[in-house]
Image: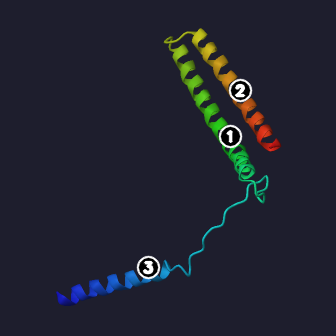
């Protein structure tokens, strides 16, 4: 029994030493900051913030737009099923379609407008 406990403690000691060596600060590489796509060498912090905002809108905007459009299409599909089952009317389907398509088009316009605005700063 004593040898079993000593064997477990030796295994724990080896594991602890291995983890300590692997997590040594000498082996760690600290990642550097990524410069924004519009440039980040300016001393003006507000310009750097706007350049990062441009990147956020450039990469995050289309993802948000795709998510919203997918939700709209799934909603319209479910509404079409309800119209076929006669739980809703065709007017409900048309009204939701017009409002949803308008919101998708408004989102595309807003994305393009904000990118143009942030690009000119």
- 84 sits left or right of 58 in the view: left
Counting from the top left corner in percent of width and height, residue 91 is at 60, 9
Around disc 3, counting alpha carbons within 10 Å, would you say few (fewer than 14), some (14 to 19), or many (20 or more)?
few
Neighbour tally class for label 1: few under 14, some 14-19, many 20 plus, Cα within 10 Å: some
Q: Mark 3 points at which residue?
A: 19
- Towards the viewer: 69 or 16: 16
Residue 102: quarter of image: top right
Which residue is identified by label 2? 106
Question: Are the residues flagged by discs 1 and 3 in contact, CB closer than 8 Å?
Answer: no
Q: Is residue 18 left or right of residue 39?
A: left
Q: Which residue is drawn at 62% across and 32% down?
A: 68
Q: How crowded is mark 2: few (under 14 residues within 10 Å), some or many (20 or more)?
A: few
Quadrant assignment, res 110: top right
Mark 3 / mark 2, whichever is N-terminal:
3
Q: Which residue does the numbered mark 1 point to in the structure image?
A: 61
Write the residue at 37% across / 85% down. Answer: 14
- The location of residue 27, given as percent across then percent down, is 56, 80
How far is mark 1 from mark 3, CA to CA? 41 Å
Which type of secondary structure does the marked residue at label 1 adopt?
helix
**Residue 114 location (% of width, % of height):** 74, 36
Of residue 46 and residue 28, the one placed in the foreground of this image is 46
Q: Residue furthest right?
A: 120
Q: Distance between the residues labelled 1 and 2?
A: 13 Å
Q: Quadrant of the N terminus?
A: bottom left
Q: What element carries label 3?
A: helix
| Among numbered discs 1 and 2, the one appearing first in the sequence | 1
| Direction from residue 86 to residue 112 in the image, left or right | right
Above/below status of 55 relative to 26: above
């Amino acid at each position: 029994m004593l040898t079993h406990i000593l064997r477990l403690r030796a295994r724990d000691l080896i594991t602890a030493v291995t983890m300590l060596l692997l997590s040594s600060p000498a082996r760690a590489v600290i990642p550097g900051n990524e410069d924004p796509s519009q440039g980040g060498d300016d001393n003006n912090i507000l310009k750097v913030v706007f350049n990062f905002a441009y990147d956020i809108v450039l990469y995050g905007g289309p993802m948000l737009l795709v998510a919203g459009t997918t939700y709209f299409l799934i909603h319209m599909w479910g509404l079409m099923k309800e119209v076929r089952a006669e739980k809703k009317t065709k007017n409900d389907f048309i009204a939701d379609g017009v409002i949803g398509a308008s919101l998708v088009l408004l989102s595309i316009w807003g994305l393009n407008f904000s990118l143009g605005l942030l690009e000119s700063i």
